[in-house]
Image: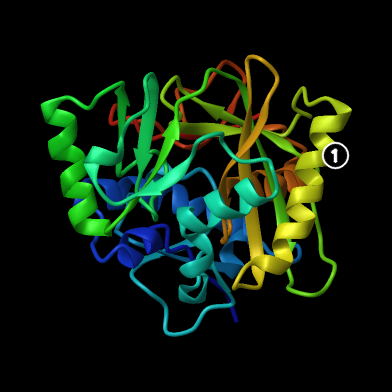
Amino acid sequence: MPFVIHANLDAEARWAGGALPARVAERVSYYAALAAFLAHGELSGDDVEVWVPAAIDERRLTFAAGIYPGAPPEADLVWAPDAAKAANDRRLATRLAAEAGIGVPGARAIASVDEIDLPGPWVAKAPWTTAGRDRCHGDGAPTGEQRTRISRLLAQFGSLVLEPWLPRAFDVGVCAIAVPGLAGQVSPPHGLVTDARGTFLGIDLAPPPLSAEQRARLEAFVRDVRAQLPYAGPIAVDGFVTTDGQLCVCEINARFSFGWVARALARRHGIEKLGFSAPPPGAHVLVEPRGDGICAWMM
């Protein structure tokens, strides 16, 4: 029997009461196919079924796996189970990080565009979203276009998380298993590769340049927060260090993440990087580029 993975990278869009646009669903489905590497044990590609949000051209994949659009009748592993919805709410992450003294300073939930009163750069994020979608960046008072954008997001989500946009030195993540009331696995911190607006571009498993104190604070937060989530399973805590050395946690992803995929690839292939931009020289391509901006590679 094959090992069946429901790689539902569209889960957060469904939790928000909508659906991904067709082109976005296709894009995330190519990346969802990489969940094949999460299969337990030393299974070959032919022993794994991955169910993804939309049909893809499997000829672009350089690894073996059975790829199926839709949802399987049963699954051995689910990328984001419906029971994780409450734990993935950014408002919860903002509150827990603030209570631990490791949140983004001034971050808070807002229910009206008139609550945006930050003097400098800011970002307003939907409670459920991934890869930089459903958010608005601004600087000072919102422009008319930004007010329209934020009003539409508020009409859809009810409230947003507002954060000052702080200058970042680097981004970090930690994968762990959340088991309320019990100890569980916490992996070493890894690097998150992002662009200037925070859009996710990949994983770098090389140790990020955290100080000993920063690493200890981050890992202590991850250990403690696992017991506070209304959820049991894989999590990924994302944060960043500002240019003046301040460590901030900005997200708790109660689901699998590409940090988990990168670690699975590292175990099987000894890689340090998983990327979704143009492949650098020497990279092993996983999803072949075709001029549409979709690509995945490891090295």
Could you tell me if residue 187 is visible in this image? no
38 or 230, which lies in front?
A: 230
Residue located 79% across and 32% down the image: 214
Relative to residue 225, is residue 122 drawn left or right? left
Disc tally is: 1
Residue located 88% across and 29% down the image: 212
Crowding at mark 1 (Cα within 10 Å: few <14, some 14-19, many 20+)? few
Kind of residue indicated by mark 1: Ala
Quadrant for the N terminus in the image: bottom right
Quadrant for the C terminus in the image: top right
Relative image position of residue 297 (x, y in whole percent): 54, 33
Could you tell me if residue 181 is visible in this image? yes
| Secondary element at tag 1 | helix
Residue located 80% across and 46% down the image: 219
Question: In this figure, which residue is indicated by the disc labeled 1?
Answer: 216
Relative image position of residue 146 (x, y in whole percent): 19, 31
69 or 138, which lies in front?
A: 138
